[in-house]
Amino acid sequence: MTASVEVINPGDVRTRTEIRAAFGGSPQGGICPSDDMHSVNLYSDPDVGEQAGYYDGWLAEEDELGPVFEYTGAGKSGDQTFDGVAGSGNRAVLRHAEQDRVLRVFTRVGKVPGSDTKTHRYLGMFTLDGMQPYVWRRVHGEDGEERSVLVFRLRPEGAVQHAAQDVIPAAEETTAEFVPFQAVTAAMFQSDPATSGALPLPKQRVRKGDTGRKAAPNAETSGTFVVPEAFGTKLSIRAATAATVAVRHEAELTQAYKAHLETAGHQTGAFQIKVKGLTSTLRTDLYDATDHVLYEAKGSNSREDVRMALGQILDYSRYVKSPEHEGEPKRVILLPSAPTPDMYTLLDRYDVEVVYRSHDGRFVGSLVP
């Protein structure tokens, strides 16, 4: 006769032994996959995270898809990774959908009275955000050294506990940290190349400096000056949507243009921005440190994307400062093809330039090196 296993619901507090009986996983570690239970159990310890320079928890700011829970990947020192033994837990989170496993989140709350046995509160089941499964972030570790960590963006799947004590603390001040050039993986998209010719191209307007170049995707940012870099692992996304395709186009476009800038001898990276009073971390797409140019990339040249890019770049550029350059950076929207003439008129009003990729793959725009 098989002993019955106690049901654990969101909000329940249990020991890891009790959790393992219900959901499997290992007795130690922060990311604990279980094949038998089709689960990847994620354990968060607020005290450990704060000492290591990060917070796990709910963002206070929800988007159009609802709430997001940020969970920092495995690896206590140095840059985190998806590779090798050190990256096995992070790979388990990234591939949970294709391996038919759900993500279950637990946060440490204390100890069993009279013992050293830790207790954990169950928050519920989650899945990776399909549009932006994770970001890279620069943090200061326990030893004071800067490092890059993976921050997974989790969406609730069913009933979850959304308690006030699990919300990430708001930033106490506004910062846009600049750090030395450092390779930081930025991929969050499928690795097969996205073509730039899938969208109809409007009649292109030739502007000053209309000499093209070659092309490419997206830098993960940190309030720090970081370096975008492609990550070659395929990501399983449950539904292929038009938005997902546009995001992949944006990533490929940004990576191509980043490669062009570096071929021209420019130093590239991104900015990670924290705004006082907010829990979320803003990130730019691409920054040319040599010429002090901030780029916002979009996967299409549609009116909606251009207007969104305009708002984003006007917002982000307020915070981007460089000791080598005076004032705010030059602002450029990076597109897969030329926008319509009236969009140029709009962008001219706000002193925002355009760089786009021509039919032959060259980059066109007055600021293209």
Image (spheres, grey):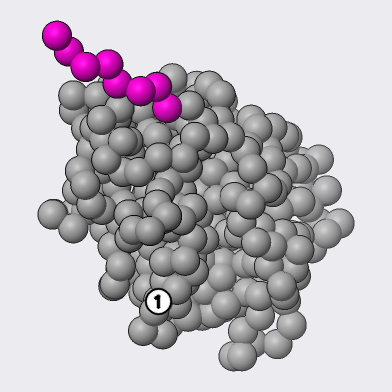
Q: Quadrant of the N terminus?
A: top left
Viewer-closest of 108 and 368:
108
Residue at (83% x, 48% y) in the render: 346
- Residue that extends furthest to the top in the rendered view of this protein: 1
Estimate the x, y position of residue 116 in percent, counting from the top left. 33, 60
Q: Which residue is the site of mark 1? A: 141
Badge 1 element:
loop
Q: Is residue 342 visible?
A: yes
Q: Taking 125 as reference, is 118 above or below it?
A: below
Residue at (76% x, 63% y) in the render: 277
Q: Main secondary structure of the magenta part?
A: loop
**Magenta stretch: residue 5 in it?**
yes
Q: Report crowding for label 1: few under 14, some 14 to 19, many 20 or more residues within 10 A (C-alpha).
A: many
Which corner quadrant of the image does residue 163 belong to? top right
**Magenta stretch: residue 324 in it?**
no
Viewer-closest of 5 and 353:
5
Estimate the x, y position of residue 173 in percent, counting from the top left. 72, 75
- Residue that extends furthest to the front in the rendered view of this protein: 114
- Residue that extends furthest to the bottom in the rendered view of this protein: 324
Amino acid at circle 1: Gly
Magenta residues (range): 1-8
Estimate the x, y position of residue 334 in percent, counting from the top left. 58, 52
Residue at (65% x, 32% y) in the render: 66
- Residue that extends furthest to the right in the rendered view of this protein: 349
Q: Is residue 221 visible?
A: no
Residue at (30% x, 67% y) in the render: 76
Which corner quadrant of the image does residue 349 belong to? bottom right
Q: Taking 338 as reference, is 57 above or below it?
A: below
